[in-house]
Image (cartoon, rainbow, N blue to C red):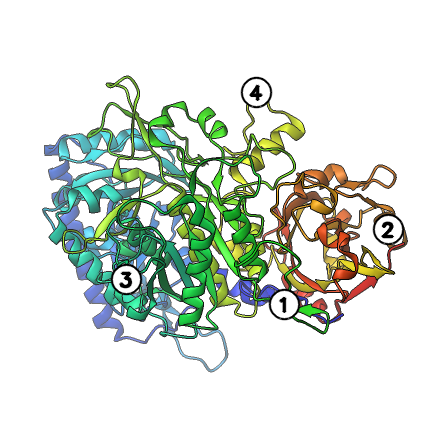
Amino acid sequence: MPELDHLFAGGFTDTQNFKSMLSAPPTRPTQDRDRARHGAGLMAQLQGLKRRVEQLRTTRVDAGFSADQGVAISLEISPPGALDAGTKLEWKRDGIEVLNITNPGEGEVITVFVPDGKLAAFEKRVAEYLNEDVPPRKPGGVLKPKNASLINAISTFRQAAFAELWTDHAPLPLEQETNHFTVWLRLGKSTSQAVATAFRVAAAPLSIDVQPGYVSFPGRVVLAVHASRAALERSLQLLDLVAEIRSTSPSAAYFLADLKPYEQAPWVQDLAQRTVYPAPEGVPFVTLLDTGVNRAHPLLDPLIGANDLHAVGQGWLTTDQHGHGSSMAGVALYGDLRVPLTSQDHHFVYHRLESVKILPDQGANSPRLYGWTANEAIRLVEAAAQGRKRTFAMMTTASGPTAGMPSEWSATIDRLAFGLNGDSLSALDLPAIVDKKPLLVPRLFVLAAGNVPWHQWHGYPASNDLETIEDPAQAWNALTVGAYTTQITFDQNKWPSLTTIAPQGALAPASRTSVGWSRSWPHKPDVVAEGGNACLDGRAAQSVTVGPEDLRVLSTSHEPHKGLLAETGDTSAATAEVARLCSLLHHRYPTFWPETIRALVVDGAQYTSVMLQQKPAEQGQLAREALVGRYGYGRVRPEVSLNSSPHRPTVVLQESIVPYIRDGAKRKLGHINLHELPWPRHELEALGESQVDLKVTLSYFIQPNPSRRGWQGKFRYQNFALRFAIRAASETSERFHQRINKIERDEMGDLREDSMPDPDSAGWFLRSRLRSRGSLHSDTWSGTATALANKSEIAVFPVGGWWKEIGAMLEEDVEMRYALVVSLELRNSADVDIYTPIANAIATTIVTEIDTP
């Protein structure tokens, strides 16, 4: 078998690089100065500071504050990096504390807190610099001024102003303009609550509106405030608590409700100017099947070519009259716009977008044409531009529950993803076979799970389990996306009667589930992404309010002449975000298959703590089954899907297998593929009882058989199915081979392992029966590093499908491909590098076949 195994790239590749990223930058040598002139100048500055501190004491007393507070002073350092502030300026005996370090322009400013009366500590060191010498360390050396490395590095002393405490990348706010800020306070020797309370009391007469709550970090307490810069500058004069001031990212409500349409334009133009766009061709594309797109938008025009707009209906306009497609385009290209709009950095987009309008501007498509519409959309774009690496994204669903059973529409999606055209859904219908491999062109589809009608959201979360996923989101080969939410904060002064429906980290109010489906069908959704939240209005008999805007996703408007920004959300926005992630993966790893991209999205997914909270009636296996029915494999985490890291390396395998082999006129199940996993045994054993997680994701595409004739025996929906098994920690290699060979693979593709059970089954989260539905399987084993060291083999093997019954009709022993993604994560050993030894072992990783009885 070919060696297609390799380590998922990205992240750090060795311990040295990792450590260098975390270490402080090396200090730069200070420049020698004119001793007398420089020392006298600094001493004069300190004397001037002493006079201003005396004036400040009087101001504080007149305002009703304590006179014996400290003061923040700023030291301009030259050259930048000449001082290690942590060792050179943290003078605990004097109570002097580093507040922050900023880099305005080409310089460096260190701001420190100086307790009342402790400016003398700086005067003392400058005086020693002027008057005392230090003998040379080596014979023949020259005398140097005492404290030379410290004092030569300081260009100036000055009292800290707002600019020195502003540590945000955003520009300084206007003096009289009211904004939202986060204020970072010194913790000192007090408790977090005492510091927060002291600031609230002191801020009240200063026209500073302090928001409820606070967050604690080592040495800091953070509060959110609404104030002008002028008010905060006055607080710096009267209070000695402030260490830093930062902006807060404007909310969607700020852009949509607070800004007039013409005021949105500078924000959008700024982002457009900061965006680095990809080449017109040779990059991944999101192919949006929706209501069309209006590309005459500053953020969309550079990323959508005029020839990349299509419509399935003859005579249809390709433009967007409804708004849905244009807002989906914005999310698919940029994500939630709040993040890039409020940044000051370059924004990189690595993919482009093409659009196929699949819905008419008036009325609706005939239900009989849903499958044809999908097939025609794919035909149009592939004929217009061949060879593009595409992620097909569709948010349209048909109303009504599916119970998980295939439809003509979902089977068409499965057929297209498998690599066939959608003209027919019957017979074997494989293209020519070369070297036992059919000439297929698999496609990646990302589908929305469908939305619960908003007027039913008052029944959350019970209504979400009752309103099941809609057609065609039950498609086996598609990546189906539901919605969760982190959005729980909005302006309660403006909306005092509203309360959010969904808690943070839980299912979004709009998201449908497959909790009520038969166990014959796959878990859907596969993953969830941000879909926004909603509120109940206590003044109107708990009526539902979609939003406010703060609880929604910010995107591009379809009417830029009226306003450039619009809100969106629900499973549509979640699907667009996952399509964006797929394109990022296509860009980063251009040789990866659609099956592999799908697996990597799931590999990075994780349940939040709220998702894992069980309902009282749900325990054990029932709770796990409900969990995957609501959330699939969890919320997407792009940074994890895209990267390996020293403590979470990811191994990616792209392989092929022969599901069935000829046995006379019949077919029998094919061989087992056995993969050796390149675990660093020595490093794992050294970690001993440390807890580790092993996540395995198997992804492959099936050919559908949607005729509704029982889906048993020769009428099964899938042409073949695969399963995986991993060697247990207590098993020898020989015992593992015996176990997987004796597993009975029955007609329905289920595994009966009673005779040879997995000794490690209790360590798996979902376990074999629950994880093995559909064509996307994922599970996580948790245990000790010592136990994992012996779990070094993984088997992939075929089980039943309708190809097994066609006998001589399938003349060749056809190879089908699969992707296997395996991640190893150390829970509490972030300083241990297991990426590098795995990377070194990849070269010897092999794949072998085991004959089945």
Mark 4 residue type: Pro
Of residues 12 and 602, the one drawn nearer to the viewer in this rendering: 602
Q: Would you say 488 lies left or right of 734 here?
A: left
Measure the C-alpha gap from mark 1 to mark 4: 52 Å
The secondary structure type at the circle numbered 2 is helix
Measure the C-alpha gap from mark 4 to mark 2: 40 Å
Q: Residue at x 11, y 44 (%)?
A: 55
Q: Which residue is mark 2?
A: 741
Q: Which callout, 2 or 3, points at the residue further toward the start of the chain?
A: 3
- Which of labels 4 and 2 is toward the front? 2
Q: Which residue is mark 1?
A: 431
Measure the C-alpha gap from mark 1 to mark 3: 38 Å
Q: Which residue is mark 4?
A: 616
What is the x, y in percent for residue 819?
Answer: 64, 59
Residue 300 numbered mark, or none: 3
Q: Which callout, 1 or 3, points at the residue further toward the start of the chain?
A: 3
Measure the C-alpha gap from mark 3 to mark 4: 47 Å
CB under 8 Å between discs 1 and 4: no
* Mark 4 burial class by Cα count in 10 Å: few <14, some 14-19, many 20+: few
Q: Which callout, 3 or 4, points at the residue further toward the start of the chain?
A: 3
